[in-house]
Amino acid sequence: MATQATPTRYAKALANDAADADVSSLRQTIYEELRHRLITGKIAPGVAISTRGLAQQLGVSQMPVRDALSRISAEGAVEIRSKRAIMVPRMSPARLEEIIRCRLLLEPTAATDALPHIDAARLRLIRAADEATDRALEQGDLNGYMESNYRFHSLIYSAAPTQILNRLVDSLWMQFGPFMRVVYGRYGTSKLVDRHVAATDAIAAKDGAALHEAILGDINDGMDLMRNWEQPGA
């Protein structure tokens, strides 16, 4: 005869499930926060990352921070050499070119995939993100620019149901975000160009080809500045 579970055993099982769900949710929250910090350049390349410092900032133990960094390491955005040697790798010319190539391949596709799913309400949010980008450029607000520029692109791409593609795009942004912040920090915002209007106009017109070209142009403009950051006289 099968042993029947008592209410107490059920209660314990439910409590364990709830605890596991809470731990999983916390780990995911920390992971998403660290991803966002990398994408927006809040973690600098070549500088040691303190799990203790991050844990204190986020008000958690070091364990979920280490777990998140392990996941991010698998995506190529940080290097873990030991418990005390974790950092964003410095950008090499070859790595930068590979990231650019992948962005040019994936992001225009992500945008055109998203186009049929962008309604009037989302387009208003996209335009608002573009306006925030413009204000950041005018005010020389580099942190504001990094945040609003990512929000603009994310609002477009995330409209599509192609979640795997979107995660790949975010992984690329994690890898170049810290380097982007360093380069733009050197130049300031005066040399940055906002090509978002062409993208928003294409979205409003439901013109997939124009949106594809607008995203290509936007990526190339930013990457040209990065390619030349160590050139004499740059």
Image (tube, grey):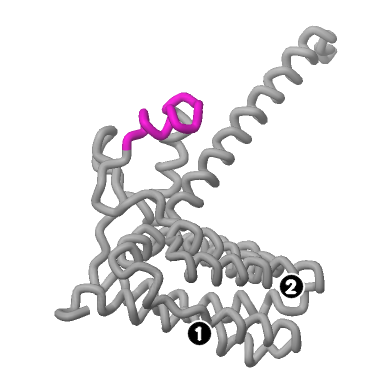
Residue 178 highlighted magenta (yes or no): no
- The magenta stretch is 50-62
Depth check: give the residue in front, 94 or 144. 144
Task: From the image, tell me which residue sits under label 2.
Answer: 123
- SS under mark 2: helix
User: Most extreme residue toward the left, as rendered?
Assistant: 232
**Do tag 1 and tag 2 residues touch (Cβ < 8 Å)?**
no
Depth check: give the residue in front, 125 or 136. 136
Quarter holding the N terminus is top right
Task: From the image, tell me which residue sits under label 1.
Answer: 216
Amino acid type for the residue under numbered disc 2: Leu
- SS under mark 1: helix
Residue 117 placement: quadrant: bottom right
Query: What is the crowding at mark 1: few (fewer than 14 residues within 10 Å), some, or many (at least 20)?
Result: many
How far, Cα to Cα, is label 1 from label 2?
Answer: 19 Å
Q: Which residue is depicted at the point 41% across and 50% down?
A: 42
